Amino acid sequence: MKPSFDSHTNIFKLSNGKVDYLIYINKLGIPVHLYFGKSLKDFNSSDFLKQPDYNYQFYKDNHFETIDHYYETITPVEISTNNSNDLRPSSISIEHGDNNLLDFRFIGFETVDIEQSEEIPHARALSPSDCILKLKLKDIQEEIYLDLYYRLLNDSNVLIRKSEVINKTGKTIYIDKLASATIDVPFQQQELIHFEGSWANERNYIKESLNYGLKMLYSLEGRSGHSENPFFIVKNKETTENFGACYGFNLIYSGNFANELNVNNYNSLRINTGINPTNFHYSLKDEERFLTPEAILTYSSSGLNELSQTNHRFVREHILSKEQREKQNKIVFNSWEGAGMNFNTDSIIDYAKKAKEIGAEIFVLDDGWFSTRNDDQHGLGDWYINENKINLKKVEEEVHKLGMGFGIWIEPECVNIDTKLFKEHPDYALGKRDRVRKFGRNQLVLDFSRKEVFETILNEIKASLKNIKIDYIKYDMNRTLGDIYSYQNPQGEVFHKYVLGVYHFMDCLLKAFPTILFENCSSGGGRFDLGMLYFSPQIWASDETNPMRRLFIQYGTSYGYPLSCISSHVSKAYGSYQTKANVAFFGTYGYEMDPRTLSQEEIQLLAKYTNFYHAVHHEMINEGTFYRLLSPFETKFASFLCVNKEKTKALFLYHSFFKQVNACQYIKLEGLNPDFEYEINGEKFSGSYLMNVGLNFSQFKEADTDSLLFLKKVEEE
Ligand code: DGJ
């Protein structure tokens, strides 16, 4: 559907029948934000356009003018410049000549999207019937152009936004800030939900009231990071999982981001989302353009579960590549928790044999197979196989003979200083040679903003693995970026060009190993973002494999990302195997332990879980609909379920974190067909009973016990 433009009211309307987005071009040519939400049957434009009763006054060359009802720091706008009278955090700041004064005005519009380059990940497999608008703006004086892109998906409550600056000034200009999207809405005591964390403690759900002042959710880690996920939600106070309006925001970006939420003294809530402006000073020569990452705005009028489901569908259909998605969700056995870097050819072959017995489909040799890498202080950056330690070819052949795929770990972006690579090219690492350079996990970061640096690593990896048949790669990155100094690129461009370098590297890697399943990881889940999912359909969500903690991590992650992207392994440590498997089922299931220490009973048990995973995973986890029921962040329980498309099957999990003596507890299910009858462990229940009364959990419970239930529609005779 094309957007409409009413030339009497000057209002653009993007609509997909379910959601409307309205923009008013005011008398000055400034795009004013009017509305984003449930489709309006009709609206009274004169009421809509009643802006605060202030006047905009300006003076230039002896000319004085007044424009009614526009006040820069109150009127909701689509874009706001630095160094103007709009005192809210700006969307854009550009240094040109000796100043950064800017004032963008509407000069036209088109209904086409930009031709996307492969330089930066973006939504894909989009429909030509999406509602697309490009607003063309120009500074009132300088030849600086700004295009604002809007794409409302035709079949889903998703709006994709991005901005592009075009320099036609004849000289170089410098972008200091450019948000992918800005949106101003009246402040109505909304709440913010965001996902903070740390290593082994990722994506904790935080709910807080928005109040006067500036709230900034950000990363300066050089990756999206553990500390804050780029995904966040703004909701009405009364909105719950299954009721009320809410908005989701995410970025297709894996580097430093800034999400600014500002409530000002005039009751305006501004939201800016985009690349973090800190240390960002990007030069644009004459005729050059700069395109931001895409911001993904989602809307639900029926609560957070629906919002998450919209995001899940969007990721599956428009972020993951078709090729990777088809290879996804094989059961991986990873050597890390069992062996660390302490292994040899025979021990790893023994691992693989046992992994096969429990049903693994891909055997992965993690860190420690190359150069002098026997601990994390050595060898990283030299990618030749350590033949003294492991006969990789033999391992690969044995694994294949066992009928499994063979996978390998790499960490291309970092370097230990004892390596040949660092000794020969000390300038390949970020930081200045004559200054202190600080380590993280005993390693420095390679300057991936430079092509020759990442090409050197890529070629080495390709050369050493050229005779090995690789079916899977786990791509890791184990520290934050620091000492931001490049010997080649301007320093204000390093953070962004670094991320582009990582994307370029991943693209080349996938071309070099076209048949692999690609998994991401960054010290556990330090890069769980849409940019990474564009390349790899699954991400190791956390180094925490304790299921009681994993429940929190996976629950938090589920708000923005589908379960099938959450890589989750059963390990040897912590709790019962049943609980570990129950939690891992609600993700991409796998194993990570020393399998040689498993008893025959344990092997049989795990093999049984493997079969169960195969029976339920595709229909319910991969393709089904996920509902959160009880939050571990807000109750002493965790509960959720996945329902298949036909609503004939569901997989439900309930976990109690504390000991409970006969307290009354019913858990109402969601997403079933009320008219169907379901069988659970031999008992029959109607869908309407399960959804309105619920499953009865009013019995004695030990702490940390759980129930995994499989629901199946009773077929009529
Ligand atoms: C951090 C990852 O999260 C682990 O799974 C493992 O791959 C180690 N790195 C290896 O160094």
Image (cartoon, helix red, strand yellow):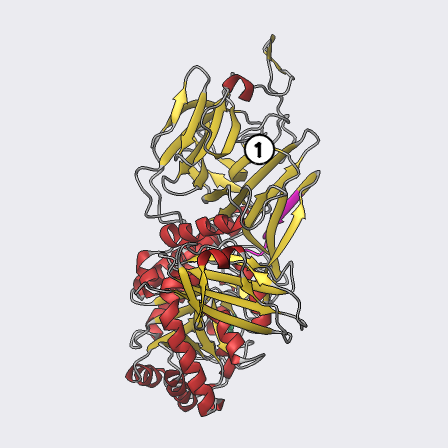
> From the Cβ of disc 1, is ligand 1 less than 8 Å away?
no
Residue 166, visible in the rendered structure: no
Q: Nearer the viewer, residue 220 or 246?
A: 246
**What span is colored magenta in the figure?**
215-222
Q: Position of residue 547 (x, y in %)?
A: 56, 72
Which residue is identified by label 1? 184
Q: Closest to the observer: 537 or 491?
A: 537
Magenta segment includes 218: yes
Residue 48: give x, y in percent of width and height.
54, 22
Count residues near mark 1 (Cα–Cα under 10 Å), then give few for <14, some for 14-19, many for 20+. many
Q: Amino acid at mark 1?
A: Asp
Report the residue at 33% width, 81% height from top. Answer: 396
User: Is residue 287 something that shows in the picture?
Assistant: yes
Q: Give the residue drawn at x 33%, y 65%.
A: 327
Q: Nearer the viewer, residue 347 or 383?
A: 347
Left or right side of 275 for 651: left
The vertical placement of 568 against 625, above or below, is below
